[in-house]
Amino acid sequence: MSAKLRAITRRQVLAGSAVSAAALASGFPAPVIANSDPIKIGYLPALTGPSSSTGVGINRGTELAVEEINAAGGVDGRKIELIVRDTQSDPTKAVNGAAELTRGQKVSVVFGPLNSGESLAVVPMLARTNTPQVHPCWVDSLTDPKKFPMCFRNAPTNQQIGGAANRYVMDVLKSKNVAVISDTTGYGTASVNAYVPMLKAAGADVVYQGNVDAANPDLKPELLRMRSAGAEAIMPWSVNAGFLSRIINTRGQMEWDVPIVGQTTLGSGQTQALLEKPEYWAKVYPNNFRSVCYAADGKLSDRTDAFLDRLKSAKIEMGDTLLWWIALGYDSPRMIAEAMKNVGTEPEQIVGFLNKLKEFPGVYGDISFTPERHDGYPDDEVVMVEANSLKNGAFKLAPGYGA
Amino acid sequence: MVESIVLSGVAVGCVYALIAITYNVMFSASRVFSFTAGTLGMLGGVLGSLFIARIGMPVAAGLVLALAGGAALGIVTEVVAVRPVLKSLDQHLYVLSTLALALMVQQFTAIEWSTEPQPFPRLLDIARGEFDQQFWLPMLACAIVIIGLELLYRHSLVGHAFLAIAEDNYAARALGLPERRLRMMSFALAGVIGALAGFAGGEMLLAFFANAPLLTFYGFVPVALGGMGNNRGAVVAGILLGLFQQAANFLVGGIFASVAVFTVFIIVLLARPEGLASAALRRHV
Amino acid sequence: MDTQATQSRPNCAHLLGSVNTFAALPFLVLMLVGVSFPLFGGGYWGVIATRACVYWVLVSGLNLVVGFAGQIAIGWVALLTLGAYTTSVLVAGNVVPALPPYLALATAAVVGAIFGLIVGLPALRLRTFYFAITTLGFATIVTQVALAWQSVTGGGVGVAGPVFPEPFSSQWGFYYFCFGLAAICTWMTANIAASRFGRALTAIRDAEVAAEACGISKPVLLGAVFLFSGAVAAVAGGLFAALQSYITPDAFTLDLSVLFFIAILIGGRSSIFGPLLGTILLTVLPEFAAPLVAWSTFLYAVLLLVIVLAIPGGIAAILDFKNRRPLESDRAIIPRPNLLERLFGAAPDAGALTLEQVALSFGGVRAIDGLDLEIRPGQVHGLIGPNGSGKTTTLNVISGYYAPQRGVVRLNGAEVPVLARHRRAPMRIARTFQTPRIVGSASVLQNVMIGGTIDGEGTFVESLLALPRHRRDEAMLRDSAMLALAVVGLERLALVRADRLQHSELRFTEIARALMLRPAFLLLDEPASGLSVDEITRLSELLLAISRSGTGVLLVEHHPDLIFDICHYVTVLNLGRTLAAGTPAEIRSHPEVINAYLGK
């Protein structure tokens, strides 16, 4: 049965209240001269709720980076204070959190939200409050240098992601009949709306297209319809590990031999934990990023190896998430801190610096912006990987994958 | 496709029918509909998953504990939400008190257990087949409950006492039947039936707190269609509902399916407010 | 006697005046706090305060449905969703050309009114629990449609909320906008509460049978309330969307519906201030501590359970100070029948009320078997007989609760429509009931004013806006009700809550309510049961005076003294048939009557 009563919101305890308790005390605007006051960076992860897989993973990298920066003396002697508001995967709460961060806490920069659905609501709102924003969400409309001049994306766009996935399905797997499925979040809906036309333009036949409630326990009706429509590949776009695991499990129960190509979360440790049988994870090809994957010789890049060592010595868990999330979370505050180190904390200065950023060296990728392009991630870094090659949060490239 | 529709339709229909029976048993004992019926179903699934999958108990022990949990909630419902308001003149307070109790249990589960659907363990160690255990377990549970209730009502003293209280409250009390204790037992029985519904249906519905409002609604539809207190009508209506819902799901897909089910239900209710069984003339004034 | 009357009337009028200003005081305090809020509340609390105002706009309308009319509409968030999406989509202009925000809000109100009616109308046909479940179903359907109808609503992606133009686009500007609308809604619903419509709603809730007898049409009144409540909820939706600045289907959760519903019940039914406080309380409560946010719905449910079990009257009952004052212990009911002339005005002008060969069976039992009866104006007609002889059934047939299977009821020769219970009142046929059907939570005066509902001329909208005709109606009804209470001797208890009265006082209250109709025919169902000997004597004088004023009285009774003292004509029933009929003297000595009923 599908379409449950999407009744009660998924709520859990707000995280980071210790940090915010201190922050709440300072209701007055800090005088510009005080150079030992902490720099406030607003942070809007989804740490709980159905789309929290991204937030949980990214958060580990972010906290590590902020720790390291502060341990090295901070930015010009000022420590970075990360003010967290858990969006609980809820766009409404994301907006409220963003309002509080800008109006109440008066942060210099906002990092996040980390999910597209929440960003769709927050990006226009932050533009109105003239707050610089860096986010890693994929939906194409979430950057627009004209409409949102202060908003920067340090991750790929749906065009980049979808391009890689669709190319793999059509050119490498040679499947023309494709089933595209997502959940009913903003991210899922926007992705399907983006990818289906891309597939059709590339000559594919989209035999099934659907948005399904992620909490639906029974996906057999959907997969049966896909099979009767003659689908040769399933492309799921969701960050909900439960939902994705149910797609994979149902395919296995039906003993339907068809590849699953899609969202990166298909390969996360969370998804793996929910599989009924480990062999179900065969022929699952999520997208990932070259910088954090094993090359043909089975080795990671030096930068990534060093990062892995740092993670291990900081005892950060990798097995239940994805390495690139942690890497992205690690890179983002460092990029923001770099900006502040160079030009200070005034919004226009930060935006000016980012507009000229060339190849900021990140573990996850080298980020570059121009005044006309606020999508900072390089095109050729998006790759498809083999899910069941997971080791230390990183993967081997998918078979047949050239470049 | 057709086999899938029939199998899953009848199976989930049996779960709905069991919840409907839960409503009916509580109604017979007190002339009150309780919002906790769906919550009992939810608890059956959650407790089963908790005891068997998370804690690691054997299936039989998990089943017994889940049913005990259901009985406990049933008794709490009677004591806290039903008994105090039966005395009051305002006849509709029971709707509010049982709603409040149901919400409390649901929210507690959401926060303490999880807000996401959690896997329900495979109960019998048999390979997956066409006619899989996730389908025939609810059907078996439904059959057991129906037969059990028949035996109880027809052939046991307690069962006769239940029937007496349901038929004519005053006369039963005049005859000296311990009404309060019998009502509590009825609610405990209803709790067991509801928990069994959730447990047997766990492999299909998973252990998810939001099953509570879902079962509250879908479990009530057979009661409304089959007539209040009418268990046989409830079973037939429940299975029909399950088939209709699954047919809509498989043929058309999720969102339209649920809209269709709700709309049909509301239309039927408006056309026959007493249910498809006949109404009785009530002394009004 | 007359001087007593004139003395007591100014006292009561004075009391009523002071009650009104006292009642307004809490509202004025809140108003003051609200208007000056920006001065001491910070930016974040401004958002919370705005949200409370938006929620109250919805809850004020829902209050009429749940609090006053007693309908358990749990899923009202459906209308919030509808209003939010309608406003946002119309302003965004992706379906029709973009509308200015105020116009979009007004359109949403119209859409909300229509859907309020659709969601609410099943209440007329379904039992309480069934109706509650259907509203939940509607809430789910609306959310699912919002998810599915991507081309309009954006589906999971959502839409941006409307932005209202200057001066309401800033945070505090928008706060004042919402506050203003909340204040208007408070005023409007308070007007309805203090109107014949508000009283009629509580009558439908607590004494539906009596409400029908007073001529209150449930479908019409509930229809009006659902229209209003739907419109107001949709407006709240538009404001909600503006406040959120972006809406997705999962912003409209069952939790919100529960919040609205519980706020009303915590506040107390038949109250405006109670639910207002309740809404503010429930909106603000989770903000005091972060963990509370996650547990908020749990807390609301606990509060609801506590209220239901311990204080069913809610905050309003706690704040009801005037009803804590003890009543006099030895109260006597002293009717003043001489005031009837002032109440009735001209003598009602009607012919006889007749039953011809009326027969009615319940299943296999013949309750009435070919009954002929004639009630003449100006006469007291007694109807007696053993239990089960069909007395009350006869009364119920006349007042339209049962349809006879044979025979007709005629008024003035014209056939009276069967089963049209609420049309008896315009025909000036009034009745009382075997068990007093009273609105316990309302005052005695309000209960009696219910009796005159159909004599009001103002419409629902006029009451909403407190237009002159509404004020005239209220003054007229209040004066008549006070007079009616003076007639039955209860004017000193006018402002007391009805459920504090003794049983005998309730019976006389029912009579006062019936007198409000200036009835041509008054049907009384065992009015003397439970009365003391003195009270029965006073009742007899009163009934005789009523009949002398021209009313035809049908008295169903068990007390032989009462019957033989005041009846002009008596019919004795046995097993649904007339055993004997005649003057009291004839009946008293009738051998069959003595055998079957009176005994030697």
Image: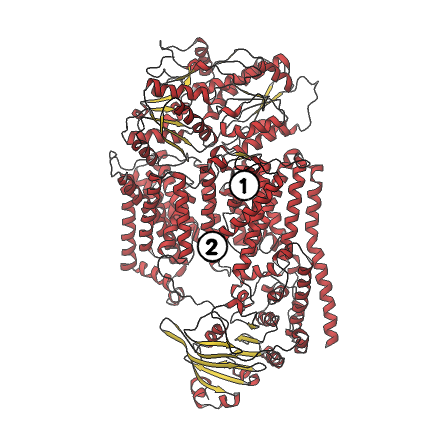
Give the x, y percent position of residue B192: 35, 48
Q: Which residue is at 51% across, 84% downward?
A: C570
Task: Label 2, secondary structure: give it.
Answer: helix
Q: Which residue is mark 1?
A: C86
Quarter location, residue B1 = top left
- Mark 2: give few (<14), some (14-19) or many (20+) Cα within 10 Å: many
Give the x, y percent position of residue B276: 36, 57
Instruction: Kindly identify which chain the residue marked by label 1 belongs to.
Output: C
Residue in the foreground of this view, choosing between C583 and A257 = A257
The amino acid type, in three-letter code, at marker 1 is Thr
Image mark for residue C122: 2
Quarter location, residue C206 = bottom right
Image mark for residue A295: none
Q: Is residue C347 above or below residue C71?
A: below
Q: Which residue is at 56% across, 12% downward?
A: A357
Q: Quadrant of the N terminus of chain C?
A: bottom right
Q: Are marks 1 and 2 in contact (CB under 8 Å)?
A: no
For marks 1 and 2 on the same chain, the one whose residue lies earlier in the sequence? 1
**Along the horizontal axis of the image, is A121 left or right of B169?**
right
Q: Report the label total.
A: 2
Q: Is residue B279 above or below residue B121?
A: below
Give the x, y percent position of residue A130: 63, 24
The amino acid type, in three-letter code, at marker 2 is Pro
Residue in the foreground of this view, choosing between C161 and C14 = C161
